[in-house]
Image: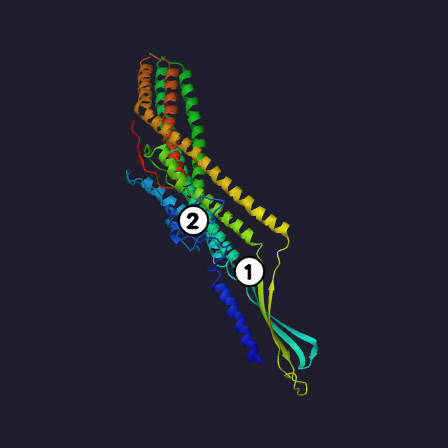
């Protein structure tokens, strides 16, 4: 009796394994066309290797190999400008960028989401587990061959194999989309570090310039006191300079608070305690992109990970349509049953007394609810169209963004050079000349104060232009998706 039952269990198991093994090789008129491995999205490790295929209504969705665990750190390299030397401040910025890539909580979350999605692609195409059941009859079923005390059954459900393959393809594309989203977020974090680094430079320069102007005002106050003591100036000159000095003290308080906020934000990006000290940069070079707007835009449309993620999600939703279409296909179930029978009948020439009967069975689902499957297909279709619209929206947004960023970079570079070459030298000469004239009693003190205010504003404007240029370049690097070479901006 047990031998016969084990025979049928083995027979059913072989049938199930055969179906599972042939799952990805079954060819039918509704199975999506399998693309060669070299023409599909095989990895998000190198963004330049991702092939995004235009979607056509009359072509089946593209197929992808099962995703593997990839090295995250190789996705996109941090841009290091070869034309500039690695100063201490530059090394500090590179260290902060590396720290942010390794420890930023959002990047860690996206990486784990990618690993989860990649793991899902390894099981979504597998057959359901077989089911083993047993029934014990309270009242035995009396038959001519004996009393049936119990029965055992083993069943295996076999979904439509093409649908399982489509579900795996969709899961693979979804995993690759998350992988591209990780790369896009990595670029955003690096650009955010560079942006805060430029703001830290600006605030540090504002503090230094304010302190230098305090020293200048102290010297002017001394000169005014000397002239008051000999009766050549009024006490109002001293009071005016003292008020200006107090204003600088107030601005220093604001600048120091802003510096602490920027340091706190940098530490947040790098996953460190907010109070961790950071040495500010002493100098930022006046650099601008070597590539033209057209070149940067074309590269961004091909290499930007966020756009690639949108394309990959479009491919995933196209496979979703295929899954929805195959939901109408029936599912099969095969089973084997074995009935345990007692040998409690007298011998008979007509039946084998005590022989255990067995049975093989098959079932099939009947997808008759047309409205349900129409709704499933409509849902998949609307998701696919929405994914298409998302791609177009991103293309338009990056086109406009790069135009704005490249224009801003050019503006900031020209402004910084204009300050450096002509405006600041002229303002310094004007202040020096009026200082000498005031000492000689030729001009009034309020004119000297006006020159000082003008120089103070222009010095702040010069360093703000450099900061704006650095921020614009960082955002261009982020939008392009690849390192954009920079060069010194000619005066």
Where 134 sits versus 147, above or below? above
* Residue 391 percent location from the top left of the image: 47, 40
**Residue most toward the right?**
139
Q: Is the residue marked by circle 2 packed among few (<14), some (14-19), or many (20+) residues within 10 Å?
A: some
Report which residue position mark 2 lands on: 103
Where 173 sits versus 438, above or below? below
Q: Find numbered disc 2 in the image and state the secondary structure of the residue it sits on.
A: helix
Q: Locate the N terminus and report the quarter of the image it occupies.
A: bottom right
Q: Locate the C terminus and report the quarter of the image it occupies.
A: top left
**Residue at image location 45% in from the left, 40% down from the top:** 265
Report which residue position mark 1 lands on: 159
Q: How many marks?
A: 2
* Residue 271 appearing in the image: no
**Residue at image location 52% in from the left, 62% down from the top:** 127
* Residue 130 percent location from the top left of the image: 56, 67
Q: Find numbered disc 1 in the image and state the secondary structure of the residue it sits on.
A: loop
**Residue at image location 64% in from the left, 53% down from the top:** 369
Q: Is residue 291 left or right of residue 182?
A: left
Of residues 469 and 89, the one nearer the viewer is: 469
* Residue 141 percent location from the top left of the image: 69, 77
- The quadrant in which residue 452 appears is top left
Q: Is the residue marked by circle 1 packed among few (<14), some (14-19), or many (20+) residues within 10 Å?
A: many
Of residues 94 and 44, the one nearer the viewer is: 44
Q: Is residue 415 left or right of residue 7?
A: left
């Amino acid at each position: 009796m047990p031998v016969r039952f084990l025979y049928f269990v083995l027979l059913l198991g072989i049938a199930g394994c055969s179906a599972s093994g042939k799952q990805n090789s079954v060819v039918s008129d509704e199975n999506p066309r399998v693309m060669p491995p070299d023409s599909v999205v095989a990895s998000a490790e190198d963004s330049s290797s991702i092939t995004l295929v235009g979607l056509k209504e009359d072509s089946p969705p593209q197929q992808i190999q099962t995703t593997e665990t990839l090295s995250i750190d190789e996705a996109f390299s941090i841009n290091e400008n070869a034309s500039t030397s690695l100063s201490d401040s530059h090394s500090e910025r590179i260290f902060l960028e590396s720290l942010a890539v390794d420890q930023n909580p959002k990047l860690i979350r996206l990486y784990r989401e990618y690993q989860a999605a990649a793991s899902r692609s390894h099981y979504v195409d597998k057959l359901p587990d077989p089911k083993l059941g047993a029934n014990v009859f309270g009242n035995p079923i009396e038959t001519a061959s004996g009393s049936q005390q119990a029965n055992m059954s083993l069943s295996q459900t076999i979904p439509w194999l093409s649908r399982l393959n489509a579900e795996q393809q969709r899961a693979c594309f979804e995993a690759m989309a998350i992988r591209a989203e990780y790369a896009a977020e990595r670029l955003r974090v690096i650009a955010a570090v560079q942006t805060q680094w430029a703001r830290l430079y600006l605030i540090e320069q504002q503090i230094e310039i304010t302190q230098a102007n305090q020293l200048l005002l102290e010297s002017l106050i001394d000169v005014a006191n000397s002239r008051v003591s000999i009766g050549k100036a009024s006490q109002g000159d001293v009071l005016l300079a003292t008020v200006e000095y107090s204003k600088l003290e107030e601005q220093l308080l604001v600048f120091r608070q802003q510096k602490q906020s920027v340091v706190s934000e940098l530490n947040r990006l790098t996953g460190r305690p907010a109070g961790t000290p950071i040495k500010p940069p002493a100098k930022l070079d006046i650099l601008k992109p070597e590539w033209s707007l057209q070149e940067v835009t074309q590269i961004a449309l091909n290499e930007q990970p966020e756009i690639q993620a949108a394309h990959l999600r479009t491919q995933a939703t196209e496979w979703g349509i295929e899954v929805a279409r195959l939901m109408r296909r029936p599912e099969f179930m095969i089973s084997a049953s074995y009935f345990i029978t007692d040998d409690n009948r007298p011998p008979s020439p007509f039946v084998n007394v005590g022989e255990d009967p067995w049975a093989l069975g098959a079932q099939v689902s009947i997808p008759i609810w047309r409205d349900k499957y129409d709704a499933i297909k409509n849902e998949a279709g609307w998701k696919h169209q929405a994914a298409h619209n998302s791609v177009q929206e991103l293309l338009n947004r990056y086109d406009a963004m790069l135009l704005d960023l490249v224009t801003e970079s050019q503006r900031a570079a020209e402004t910084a050079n204009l300050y450096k070459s002509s405006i600041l030298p002229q303002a310094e000469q004007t202040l020096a000349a009026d200082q000498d004239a005031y000492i000689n009693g030729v001009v009034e003190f309020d004119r000297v104060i006006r020159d000082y205010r003008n120089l103070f504003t222009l010095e702040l404007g010069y360093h703000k232009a450099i900061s704006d240029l650095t921020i614009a370049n960082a955002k261009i690097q982020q939008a392009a998706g690849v390192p954009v070479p920079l060069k010194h901006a000619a005066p």
